[in-house]
Amino acid sequence: MGQEAYDKLWKLIGLRYKSHPWHGIEIGKRTPRVVTSFIEVIPSDTVKYEVDKKTGYLKIDRPQKFSNIVPALYGFIPQTYCKEQVAAYCMEKTGKTDIIGDDDPLDICVLTEREVTHGNIIVKAKPIGGFRMLDGGEADDKIIAVLENDEVYGKWNDVSELPPSIINRLQHYFLTYKQLPGDKPKCEITHTYGRAEAQEVIRRSQIDYNKAYGNLEEVMSMTLMEAFNFGQRQQDILKDL
C-alpha cells in the first residue's frame, strides 16, 4: 500500500472516529508563533477536568477545593510532551538539578475577553510568555497565550505588556490550586518569562513528543498493513480448502 493510499485511509478514519485531543489534533503549521490549544477547563468550572490519556475523553480530575478558579481558558498544546528536553531547559534556566519532566502535554492558559461557556474545544492561541513552574521536582511550565485575533488581548505580543494584576491572578491560581490549608507549598514559580522563552519551551516539548510518539502514525499504518495481510492470508487459505 502506497503513501497516497495511507493518506486517504487516515482521512476516512478521521471522518468516522473522533481524534484523540493529545495525539490526533495537529499543533498547527505556524507553531510556535501560533498554536492549536485544546481547552479542558474554563473560569466558570467548579470542577477541574482533564483529558484521560487512554481514551481522549474529558474526566473529572478533582473538584475545586476552595474558591479559587482558573482565571483563563486552560488546557494543553496537542502533540507536545514534557520530558528530557523541557526538564533540561528548566535546569539550565533555574540552576537546579534533578528536575524531570511531568510526562504530560505542555499546559497553556489562553486569555480572551469573550465569555466561553464550555471546555472540550479547540482554539488558536498566540503564546506571549509563561511561568517556569516546579511541581514536586517536576518541570510543569504554564504557557501564557492570548486568543488569536481577540479584540482586547490580541494586541499584546509579550507577557511584559500585560497588566500586573493579570499576572498576579494567574500566579496565585497556580501556586494555590493544589494546596490545602496548613500544608507546605508544593508548587513554585521560579520565573515569569517572555515570548522568546515560551516559544523555546514549545519547541523543546515538540522534540520530546516526537521522541516518544513521533512515529505513532507510522506504527499504526504498519499495524493496518499487518491486519490487511492477515486477512488476505485467511482468504487464500479458505480458497485452498
Image (tube, grey):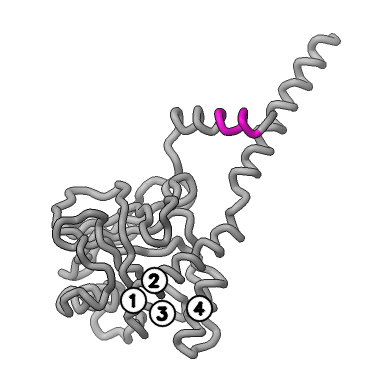
Q: Which residue is mark 3?
A: 134
Assess disc 4: are there few (<14), some (14-19) or many (≥20) residues with their C-alpha within 10 Å of its C-alpha.
Answer: some
Q: Earlier in the sequence, mark 3 or mark 4?
A: 4
Q: CA distance from mark 3 to mark 4?
A: 12 Å
Tell me how far mark 3 sits from mark 1, CA to CA. 17 Å
* Horizontal side of residue 137 vs 210, given as left or right: left
Number of numbered tags placed on the structure image: 4
Q: Read off the magenta span.
A: 3-9
Among the 4 quarters of the image, the one containing residue 107:
bottom left
Whole-percent x, y for residue 37 in the image: 35, 54
The residue lying at 38 percent from left, 61 percent from top is 33
Q: Give the class, few, some or many, for how many residues have Cα within 10 Å of label 1's Cα (few <14, many ≥20).
A: many
**Contact between labelled residues 4 and 3, with CB atoms less than 8 Å apart:** no
Nearer mark to the viewer, of 2 and 3: 2
Q: Earlier in the sequence, mark 4 or mark 2?
A: 4
Q: Which residue is mark 2?
A: 198
Whether the residues at callouts 1 and 2 have beta carbons within 8 Å, the answer is: yes
Q: Which residue is mark 1?
A: 194
Q: Is residue 108 above or below residue 89?
A: above
Q: Give, as a three-letter code, the residue at label 1.
A: Gly
Picture quarter containing residue 6? Answer: top right
- The quadrant the N terminus occupies is top right
Is disc 4 placed on a helix, strand or loop?
Answer: helix
Q: CA distance from mark 4 to mark 2?
A: 11 Å
Q: Quadrant where the C terminus lies?
A: top right
Give the x, y percent position of residue 13: 50, 31
> In this view of the protein, which residue sits in the foreground, 118 or 79?
79
Callout 2 amino acid: Ala
Q: Earlier in the sequence, mark 2 or mark 3?
A: 3
Residue bearing mark 4: 89
